[in-house]
Amino acid sequence: MYVHERKDWPRLTWDRERLAEPLAAVRHQQGRLIGHMEALGFSLCQEAVLQTLTSDVLKSSEIEGEKLDAEQVRSSIARRLGMDIGALRPADRENVRMARIAVPKRAQRHDEDQGRGLA
């Protein structure tokens, strides 16, 4: 069940005290993951970002009832990030639109978190 399908949407409530510890643990693991990615090298970090953004776009469009081609989405996002991933598939307008929506916000947030650019 998606959050927007809940009966109480959009009036959600949560218990801060109950969430504080699990969120702190996730943030700690996120920091460890970022450290591991940096140790692996920049190209692997770029690939991880590309995979994450592709997944985000596909899942977001699925929630909206759209089914996008995964390879076209991946190609569109790679182009937006200036990444060379070999033979890029031509993308239709919807895939390009979704890539434009996803990349600037994600890339900017990643840059702010990491203090450096993606490409």
Image (spheres, rainbow, N blue to C red):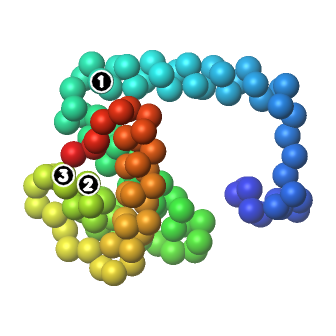
- At 60% across and 25% down in the image, what residue appears? 26
Give residue 40's quadrant in the image.
top left
Q: Provide the residue designation for mark 2.
A: 81
Nearer the observer, 116 or 5: 116
- At 82% across and 61% down in the image, what residue appears? 10
- For the residues bearing labels 2 and 3, Cβ distance under 8 angstroms: yes
- At 32% across and 48% down in the image, what residue appears? 50
x and y percentages locating residue 80 in the rendered image: 27, 61
Viewer can see residue 8 = yes
Q: Provide the residue designation for mark 1.
A: 38
Category of crowding for the residue at label 1, using alpha-carbon neighbours closer than 10 angstroms: few (below 14), some (14–19), many (at least 20): some
Q: For residue 73, which numbered disc appears in the image? A: none
Q: Quadrant of the N terminus?
A: bottom right
Q: Provide the residue designation for mark 3.
A: 83
Nearer the observer, 105 or 76: 105
Question: Please, what is the three-letter code of the amino acid marked with disc 3?
Answer: Met
Q: Quadrant of the C terminus?
A: top left
